[in-house]
Amino acid sequence: MSSILSIKNLNKIYSGKFQALKNINLEIRRGEIFALLGPNGAGKTTLINTVCGIVNPTNGQILVDGYDIIKDFRVTRSLIGLVPQELATDAFETVWDTVTLSRGLFGKAPNKPYIEEILKQLSLWDKKKNTIRTLSGGMKRRVMIAKALSHEPKVLFLDEPTAGVDVNLRKDMWEHVGALQKTGVTIILTTHYLEEAQEMADRVGVINHGEIIITENKNDLMKKMGRKQLILDLKNPLTEIPAKLSPWSLKLNTDRTQLTYMYDSAKEDNGIAKLLAELSLSGVSYKDIHTKEDSLEEIFIELVKK
Ligand SMILES: Nc1ncnc2c1ncn2[C@@H]1O[C@H](COP(=O)(O)OP(=O)(O)OP(=O)(O)O)[C@@H](O)[C@H]1O
Ligand SMILES: [Mg+2]
């Protein structure tokens, strides 16, 4: 089956000067959730907006379900729904009206049962008569999703759907997105949060300085990037790391109360058991022990180095 979205040799140069996208080649599979990860300014929004026809590509080709975004722009726009990074809604309109109007803008015949279904799916049904300005930030974002879905698109773009959203709401959002996928919508989202990509995505792409540096099945990427830190909070400050512990290349923090061990979580023998045994033999006692995954930033640094 052909890709739902096919991007070939895409470049974007803003005002003849700044190259925001560098030779992007990307195929999005029908029905998948694809997470585009990247630091601020990497080009995520530029890429999404180019596909959605908001930013003009400098060159290259983009096909949505086989239709060219320039030659067949009417078709491609109706196939796409976009929840932009910057939320913009009419504050004085009601939830019901804004979503219904949005459908009308695409020339679709009214379909009350469908609007009802998406509002229910996004837990907005009891807010349908509320004006947008009376909603919380997380609710507003869900209204934006409802708007983006109002014309029954095949592909939904979510540009940082959970920016500024608290942990609980973020989890709700992940569930909503999962439910949407089950209805057959292909979803492409951007995020800074590795955890988010981990929870939601089937595949992950990492973009940095306008270049896609990797696209990978989520599970494979997580394995590859599976570096973790084991952190030991010591009972007593340590003046120096005992020589016997040198094989673990431990790091002692500045106030000498914390030891950090970096290990590869994908490896069968990660060295933790032996380390703990050696610590007790060396008389180093600790009061707490915890693990931490590499942050997205750390992973980026690793990827860029490679
Ligand atoms: N209209 C524009 N004119 C000139 N440069 C722009 C324009 N829009 C974006 N850029 C530049 O293109 C680069 C990519 O921006 P973009 O908004 O795509 O990044 P992003 O990955 O979405 O970042 P963020 O995570 O902060 O949303 C940035 O350096 C930005 O300054
Ligand atoms: Mg952005």
Image: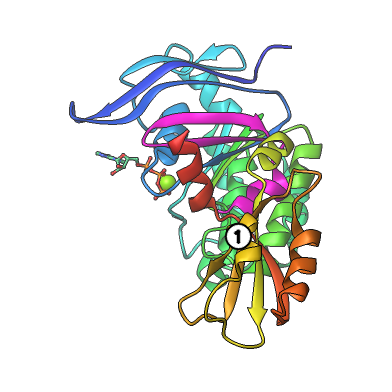
Residue at disc 1, secondary structure: helix
Residue depicted at 65% across the width and 79% down the height? 233
Q: Is residue 216 magenta?
A: yes
Q: Residues within 10 Å of mark 1 (few under 14, many from 20)?
A: few
Q: Where residue 299 sits in the image (x, y, percent)? A: 53, 46
Q: Is residue 296 visible?
A: yes
Above-or-below relation of 276 to 189: below
Is the residue 283 above or below the residue 164 in the image? Answer: below
x and y, in percent, of residue 245 in the image: 65, 64
Numbered circles on residues, count: 1
Could one spot residue 107 in this view of the protein?
A: no
Quarter in which the N terminus is drawn: top right
Rendered position, 71 above or below 47: above
Residue 295 versus residue 201: which sits nearer the camera? Answer: 295
Q: What x and y, as percent, mark residue 107?
A: 56, 30
Looking at numbered disc 1 in the image, what kind of residue is underneath it?
A: Ser
The quadrant where residue 294 appears: bottom right
Q: Nearer the viewer, residue 52 or 125?
A: 52
Residue tagged 1 = 246
Q: Is mark 1 within 8 Å of ligand 1?
A: no
Q: Residue at x 50, y 38 (%)?
A: 303
Which residue is situated farthest in the front direction here? 243
As for residue 290 lying within the magenta part, the answer is no
Which of 156/201 is in front?
201
Would you identify the image quadrant in which residue 95 lies? bottom right
Using the rendered view, name the quadrant where residue 16 is placed.
top left
**Stretch in magenta:** 193-217
In the image, residue 135 lies at what x, y percent? 57, 70
